[in-house]
Amino acid sequence: MSTSEPKSGERVRDVRVTDDAISVDLFDGRTITVPLAWYPRLLHATPEERANWRIAGAGYGIHWPDLDEDLTAQGLLRGAPAPRGRAKAA
């Protein structure tokens, strides 16, 4: 399987997390919205933990320090949910 290099427009501009979804605005004008259920750590987090995110990976990723969760713009564009077994047991 080959992976392509991220394009400059795929850098993260803003992130919004609701009770149901994650929406990520990219610099090229696209908005990616995916179900929060794809990311159990975020799904089970408090609103405060979800709101504490940082742009990471030279602008191509998102990091939630309180949750030790990282997502990439490329993964979101591919529609890649978190691998099973990644969430910490409650």
Image (cartoon, helix red, strand yellow):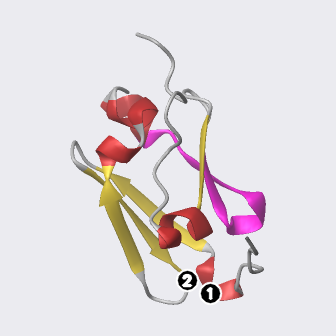
Place of residue 49 in the rendered image (x, y in percent of width and height, measured from the top left) = 44, 30
Place of residue 80 in the rendered image (x, y in percent of width and height, measured from the top left) = 49, 59
Amino acid identity at mark 2: Phe
Give the class, few, some or many, for how many residues have Cα within 10 Å of label 1's Cα (few <14, many ≥20).
some
Q: Residue at x 53, y 71 (%)?
A: 13
- Identify residue for label 2: 27
Asked if residue 68 lies left or right of residue 81, the reply is right
Q: Nearer the viewer, residue 35 or 13?
A: 35
- Residue 8 falls within the magenta-colored stretch: no
Where does the N terminus fall, quadrant-wise?
bottom right
Q: Are marks 1 and 2 in contact (CB under 8 Å)?
A: yes
- Identify residue for label 1: 9
Q: Residue at x 55, y 30 (%)?
A: 86
Up the image or down, 41 lies above or below 22; here it is above
Place of residue 75 in the rendered image (x, y in percent of width and height, measured from the top left) = 57, 63
Place of residue 48 in the rendered image (x, y in percent of width and height, measured from the top left) = 38, 31
Up the image or down, 49 lies above or below 27; here it is above
Up the image or down, 16 lies above or below 64; here it is below
Measure the C-alpha gap from mark 1 to mark 2: 5 Å
Up the image or down, 61 lies above or below 26; here it is above
Q: Which residue extends farthest front?
A: 1
Q: Which residue extends farthest left?
A: 20
User: Which span of residues is magenta-colored?
Assistant: 51-63
Give the class, few, some or many, for how many residues have Cα within 10 Å of label 2's Cα (few <14, many ≥20).
some
Q: Residue at x 32, y 46 (%)?
A: 36
First reached walking from the N terminus: tag 1 or tag 2: 1
Q: Residue at x 44, y 59 (%)?
A: 15
Amino acid identity at mark 1: Gly
What kind of element bears circle 2?
loop
What kind of element bears circle 1?
helix
Asked if residue 89 lies left or right of residue 43, the reply is right
- Residue 58 falls within the magenta-colored stretch: yes
